[in-house]
Image (tube, rainbow, N blue to C red):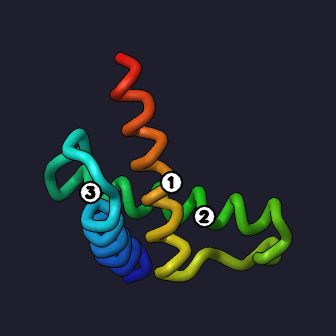
Amino acid sequence: MGIIWAIIIGFLAGLIAKWITPGDNKPQGFILTTVLGIVGSVVATWLGQQIGWYGPGDGANFIGAIVGAVVILLAWGQLARRM
């Protein structure tokens, strides 16, 4: 059941991040949006652990997943602009 929740939360975080981030060059589709949210959560967890906000067993919450996905989309926009 944990994997299904990760997919649902990842999809919602990816949708909100795509809605917040300006620009047209964003990944499209259910699978890419879900992967964006899940990877955003992983990035937020890693950054939070490096800064000291999260402990070794802690993970990012829903807001952290959205922030991580926005960071990924902003980096994606910078890379797409250069190509």
**Residue type marked 2:** Ala
Q: Which residue is the site of mark 1?
A: 71
Instruction: Looking at the image, tell me whether mark 3 or mark 1 is earlier in sequence order.
Output: 3
Q: Nearer the viewer, residue 65 or 22?
A: 22
Q: CA distance from mark 3 to mark 1?
A: 14 Å
Q: Residue furthest front?
A: 22
Q: Is residue 24 above or below residue 11?
A: above
Query: Badge 1: how crowded within 10 Å, few (<14), some, or many (20+)?
Result: some
Residue 78 lies, in percent from the top left, at 44, 34
Q: Are marks 1 and 2 in contact (CB under 8 Å)?
A: yes
Residue under the point 26% across and 57% down: 33
Quarter placement of the C terminus: top left
Residue 60: image quadrant is bottom right
Q: Quadrant of residue 12?
A: bottom left
Q: Is residue 46 above or below residue 56?
A: above
Position of residue 54 in the picture relative to residue 20 (left or right): right
The crowd level at tag 2 (other Cα within 10 Å; few <14, some 14-19, many 20+) is: many
**Marked residue nearer the N-terminal end (2 or 3):** 3
How far apart marks 1 and 2 lie (CA) works out to: 9 Å
Q: Dot 2: what SS? A: helix
Residue 41: percent from left, percent from top: 52, 65
Give amino acid for label 3.
Thr
Residue displayed at 37% across by 55% down: 36
Q: Nearer the viewer, mark 1 or mark 2?
A: 1
Mark 2 lies on residue: 44
For the point 60% across and 64% down, the residue is 44
Above-or-below relation of 4 to 33: below
Residue indicated by mark 3: 33
Circle 3: element type: helix
Label 1: which secondary element: helix
